[in-house]
Image: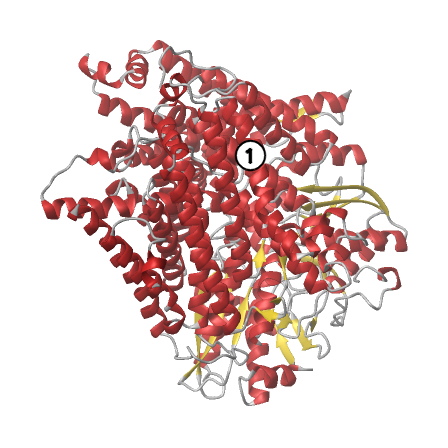
Amino acid sequence: MIMNWMKLIPGSRTRRIVWAVLILLLCMAPLFMTPFRLGLFTKFIALAILAVGLDLIWGYGGILSLGHGVFFGLGAYAIAMYLKLEASGSSIPDFMSWSGINALPFFWEPFRYFPVAFLLGILIPAALALILGYFTFRNRIVGVYFTILTQALVMIVVTLFVGKQEWTGGTNGLTGYRDIFGFAFQDSGTKIALYFITLAALIIAYLLCRYIVNSRAGQVLEASRDGENRVRFLGYDPSRFKTFAFTVSGALAGLSGMLFVLQVGIISPSMMGIVPSIEMVLWVALGGRGTLIGAIIGAVVLNAAKTGISEAYPEGWLLVLGGLFVAVVVLMPSGLTGLWNRIVRIFYRQGGSEHAVIRKEG
Amino acid sequence: MRLRSLMTKGWAISLVCMVLLSGCLSEKEPATTTSGSNTQAATEASGETIKVGILHSLSGTMAISEVSVKDAELLAIEEINAAGGVLGKQIEPILEDGASDWPTFAEKAGKLLQQNKVAAVFGGWTSASRKAMLPVFEQNNGLLFYPVQYEGLESSPNIFYTGATTNQQIVPSVTWLLENRGKKMFLLGSDYVFPRTANKIIKAQLEAEGGQLVGEEYTPLGHTDYSTVITKIKEAKPDIVYNTLNGDSNVAFFKQLKDAGITSKDLTTLSVSVAEEEIRGIGADILEGHLAAWNYYQTTDTPENKTFVEKYKAKYGSNRVTADPIEAGYTAVYLWKAAVEKAGSTDVDKVKEAAKGIEFAAPEGKVTVDGDNQHIYKTVRIGEVGADGQFKELWNSGEPVKPDPYLKSYPWAAGLGE
Amino acid sequence: MEMLILQTFNGLSVSSILLLIALGLAVTFGLMNVINMAHGELIMIGAYSAYVTQNLFASYLPKSWYEGYFFAALAASFLIAALMGCLLETILIRHLYGRPLDSLLATWGVGMMLQQVARFIFGAPNVAVTSPSWLNGGLAITSTLVLPYKRLFIMALVALVLTAMYLYIYKSASGRRMRAVMQNREMAGCLGISTRHVDSLTFAIGSGIAGIAGCALTLLGPIGPSIGTYYIVDAFMVVVLGGVGKLIGTVAGALGIGIFNTLFETYTSASIGKVLVFACIVAFLQWKPRGLVALRTRSLD
């Protein structure tokens, strides 16, 4: 039975055992963490889902997006709208009445139903990524031009969300909900359940991205990162593969946002802004881009470091964290994964060329 | 092949280490792992000290304002400790950084209540940060003292509001302006919740009291070019600009207003977010003659204020200034102390009960906690900026005004809150 | 009519400010391909340099000299920011050439640290720089149409910086070396140009111009530890919209964004105006994927 289950995990036998032990350990996490720490850990895992998606397009597609905060935020808002409507009962959400509207705007109506809100939380970011990706990649906007374009997208969406206070809650964002399906977020039981749901979502996201990366589409994606024109000469249309990867990435960011809201209990435009969007890229860079597991590790480690350092040095943590970024980029060009591989190589004195781990820039 | 598997193993090992590390982190905290109920987060302090949380933005764009409030709160704690503490115990402040980011405020509030089990938290500045923290405090039955004037329409059983609500700042100042400075008003604010809600109230009031709205503009937070807005103000020809801009935008607006040839003699402006601290960052020469509405100025003439200003400057430097939110933060600590001493305990419910009707001789004059809505009675003051960067009081309400966050005593405000 | 003139002037003024903050980035990012996220913090350093210079003048020099502090401040801002840039290049950026995205991450970290350092040194609240009295007021064309001297001064300053940059890059021997290194590093090295030296110098110049921008912005805006964050995105938009690597493109980008921003803001609100401008940038890049003025090249990636 266990062996059958383990066959789901790809790779060699040792690899399978290692993974099984790892997942088992993660499943036991609630036993040795306070509810508060477990909540934080769940948040980190939720963010890791976004990191995996970001790595798919950056590490494998060579496309750097500084706009993933938007996709994250759209997913988060979808589920927050559902929770807000639930919390408000029959009346309209409190911020709407402050802002002077008396009826629920029509586009809020679908969010009364959880399945709809859940689907829209994935579909809206995916659709936005699809539309943006379709035009942008078809018009061959590449490299830093694409990166800046995603920043413009961030500015547009954030300014709109802040400005349309009567529809979105403005800078306050959406907060003030306590339970889902009658389970209070505060209860340990709910927290543990959320932890497992989030963990499962991360594993599914990881396996999905792994499948994509190992598929033929993934190989074309990687090839177009290393030489887009050559791929084109071979008769493939790189923009299609890029659009596909970008859409998947957007959907995963939406999923991540939804799980984030369930854990943190608030979403505001500040979470969609330029700064969080850049931080998301840092997770992937620190973990090691081009390896999916690196993205996960980067997201968890960096967020844990941010929390830990800011708790330990509330007045000087920016210095420490900033210094950490600089050190990582200079000393570990391919992130934690690269560092590990290097250590292993030195240990075995194989001195294999670095090219295997350092990926070409987009 | 061996190399490969070792790499994989390495990954697994590091992940395991990570999980264990988080486990270790949690072991340092009080052992409450198995307890299901967190409702008594802020329980009786059993140790040598009583822990309180200080939660302000120490980094990010809001740090320009919030760091000074943190300083005032620490000063109050230091004074209380020097005088023997509370209930014979020393107060131990635990500092956290909200980083100008609302989800971070919620996270850190949770940490203070659940991990550190603090008896009370002093913190927040923006309405958004308070709204983010509110559910955390209600779920954990914690106690938050919020020290800044805000847009009202709120009254959480777990929050004490030591800054002004609308009827202690905005409403009386609009009445005063209409009586003394003219009828045509232009509303200018940053694009977020406080200005939009405040302006909604002002519009209702203008209609009821015979004022006229000639323009309304919102600029994004952090906006630094006001040339177009100033052109629009010139076109609208108002008597008064009612300014609810936030932080840095005020600097840009007033500098550029002066350059456009508009001085306080040509146009009355009244600001609700420009205090002594902000004047120091804009320059007194630029703001001279402009108005503000607050409950406290550094020049407020009470014996308590004299000692407060002296102590603040002695601790943080003679070039520092005190301002309304700074004073409200300082007062908050003393109000909490008084309530704890009256209750004889730091238990949240007992402290809340004891706080009803508590009086304190604050630097701004006598303040009283309103038992119904946990706001405090405050004196309203309208001041004019002088050449030295200090306010000259033009008008005050004479006595502390009863807080009315939902503006129930104003007929024209019916329907605004709900 | 008056409003039209005033708004045209405002549009040009906004453009000149955008150009000033983007010019330094046009060098470090446009020419050197370093995505310098600490550019905003270099602007902040320029602003604080002006503040310190003003205080030094006020406390150590005769009162009659005070009015001239602004020129000293401009020079000081340039030098201090350039020094900072030189330091940054030597310690950090030199390890990152050819890895533009890594330079983004590292300079982001540097920016965080500089903000915190500024907070430690100058305190978290904003500080005030009193502008010299000869810049107060404005050129009155009619009784209601006033063109502020400060905005005119910034326009003149931008023109001056731009001319100086043009002369340096395209007319001087040092500038020729700079262009050679940026176009083909190996070949330039083979021809005996010290690429290390040129890199440092170029980065220092770009940073210095950011410092000047910071100093000039004290006339109009706030001076605090996190002011860099207000300008950084706009600066990148200008450079990218104009086309990376071309000075004339940066000028065109600034003019485009500045004028359209003012136009939209006049007829809508500041928020909606901003949204429209950024939407236009997204749409424009679809049409011209390499910016307004594309660098012509025959190379394929």
**Residue found at x 45% / y 23%:** A237
Q: Is residue C40 above or below residue B121?
A: above
As displayed, is residue B397 above or below residue A130?
below
Q: Nearer the viewer, residue A124 or C23?
A: A124
Label 1 sits on residue: A130
Pick the residue in front: C152 or B231: B231
The residue closer to the viewer here, C181 or A169, is: A169
Position of residue C90 relative to residue C189, above or below, is below
- A212 or A269, which is in the foreground? A212
Image coordinates for residue A327, horizontal then vertical, percent = 28, 45
**Image quadrant where one finds the N terminus of chain A:** bottom left
Disc 1 on helix, strand or loop?
A: helix
Residue A143 in view, yes or no: yes
- Color encoding of the figure: secondary structure
Write down the quadrant of residue B93 in the picture: bottom left
Chain identifier of the residue bearing label 1 in the image: A
